[in-house]
Image (cartoon, grey):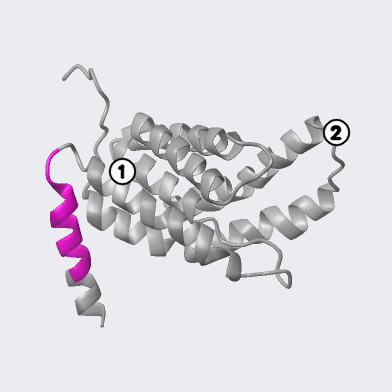
Amino acid sequence: MRASLSAALAALGDLVRGRGNGIRAVVVLGVVVVLLQVTLVPRIGGDGFGGTPDLVAALVVSVALLRGTLVGAVTGFSAGLLVELLAPTDTLGVLALLYLAAGAWCGRFAESPEPPGLAVTLALVALVAALVPVGVAVLDVLRGQEIPIGYLLGRVALPQALFSAIFAPLVVVPARRLLGPPRVVEPLMVPR
């Protein structure tokens, strides 16, 4: 089973890597992760534990760490907007902007001389997954809704961070396999 999964990932990587710095790989991975996020993830966790895993956070962090600020920000915005379009909310664009900020921030780590390890990646996924519901709650408070802080932190943000860190390798490992070694992809970048 593991060998066949590895062979399938390798074949998919060969298919999407092609030209264009792996942008096709990012698009394919993004669509798959967003579809999993809106179809299967709501069934995981549930009311007994609070939050659910945020696979989109894992996608955004992975792509940003492997391809830099610009690709991470564009991936975050695109994935967030796609999630909002497929699972409509009352405010369109909030998740897109939050994931854009997360992708831009995490992309700064791609510029370091050493690529971040798996532990750093999982920590960033947990942090982003915890901050996204806090950002949505801040907007809700600005719109006049009352949100108890204890409920937000104890029943939504912290469980979502924990679940996201647990399920993140399902996205991080294929992303590393498909995108290859980290390299910053920026248009109009002047070679040194």
Q: Residue at x 42, y 33 (%)?
A: 73
Q: Which mark is residue 66?
A: 1
Question: Badge 1: few (under 14), some or many (20 or more) residues near its Cα, within 10 Å?
Answer: many
Identify the amino acid type marked 2.
Gly
Q: Which residues are magenta?
A: 8-19
Indicate the secondary structure of the residue bearing disc 1: helix
Q: Residue at x 66, y 61 (%)?
A: 51
Q: Position of residue 61 (x, y in %)?
A: 43, 45
Identify the amino acid type marked 1.
Leu
> Which residue carries the number 2 mark?
144
Residue situated in front as seen by the camera: 141 or 103: 141
Is residue 119 among what the camera can see?
no
Residue 17 part of the magenta segment: yes
Q: Main secondary structure of the magenta part?
A: helix
The disc, 1 or 2, on the residue closer to the chain's N-terminal end is 1
Indicate the secondary structure of the residue bearing disc 2: loop
Q: Position of residue 128 (x, y in %)?
A: 55, 45
Left of 23 or right of it: where is 155? right
